[in-house]
Amino acid sequence: MTERKRRETPQEKLLRLTEIERGLWDGGLRIAGIDEVGRGPLAGPVVTACVSIPANKLVPGVDDSKKLSEKRREALFPLLLEAADYAETCFIGPDVIDEINILQATRRAMETCAARFDGDILLIDAVEGLQLPCEALSLVHGDALSYMIGAASIVAKVTRDRYMMELDAKYPMYGFARNKGYGTAEHIAALKRYGPCPEHRRSFIGRILGESHE
């Protein structure tokens, strides 16, 4: 009979997620993490966050935002902002996404939210070649490896989700409160029935509506 894998304790998880950070803190460096949310949806902005939390103010429970429930993310959000000595977000809307493509929009948003960070190293989730105010370290699956990127992912996710809730009140027919702009069956059916609103990314929905995007 296979022995069940022992569940990671909160302290073990915190040690694992801060392994990269601790190596940098030991060198006296100030660090921040950058992450994005909203590259894939059919509607709404892409949102990035840059967050720096001192080693003595770490908030327990941080993880990749995708691994946390909405309730848990909402609970962590104000705690992270209170602990942070730097926390900035940036929204890039559908019009710019359509103009320069989602990758370039994401890069622009990352550069913007980090522009005023006056520390030493920025940890980034799998994006390279950004114009940043200090040295950067790109990590594949960084939001699952780095505490600071995980914190940024939570701030970006909650910020964007709250914005999509506001859009739901303005455009209730698309179900933005439930789908957050992603291409669910409900959302696609509403697109075909009502057509797009100003928050839709025309470059993402052309095939759904049988249109071409120039």
Image (cartoon, grey):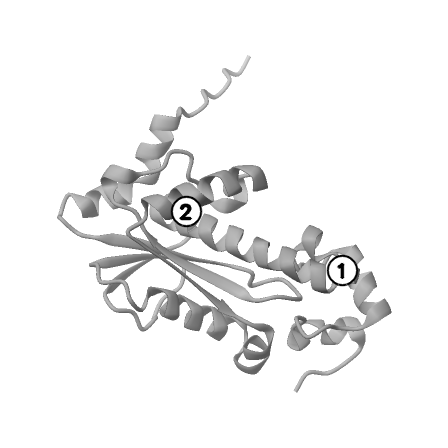
Residue carrying label 2: 150
195 vs 8, nearest the viewer: 195
Horizontal and vertical percent for residue 44?
A: 61, 66
Q: Residue furthest right?
A: 193
Residue 19: quarter of image:
top left
166 and 190: which one is in front? Answer: 166
**Position of the N terminus by quadrant:** top right
Quarter of the C terminus within the rendering = bottom right
Toward which corner of the image does residue 40 lie, by quadrant?
Answer: bottom right
Mark 1 — residue?
Answer: 172
Q: Is residue 19 visible?
A: yes
Give me the residue at 45% from left, 20% from top.
6
Report the mark closest to the observer, 1 or 2: 1
Residue 125 visible in the snapshot: no
Nearer the observer, 133 or 145 = 133
Name the residue at 53% across, 45% down. 66
Residue 36 vs residue 17: left or right?
A: right
Q: Residue at x 49, y 38 (%)?
A: 75
Label 1 secondary element: helix
**Element type at marker 2?**
helix
Q: Amino acid at mark 1?
A: Pro
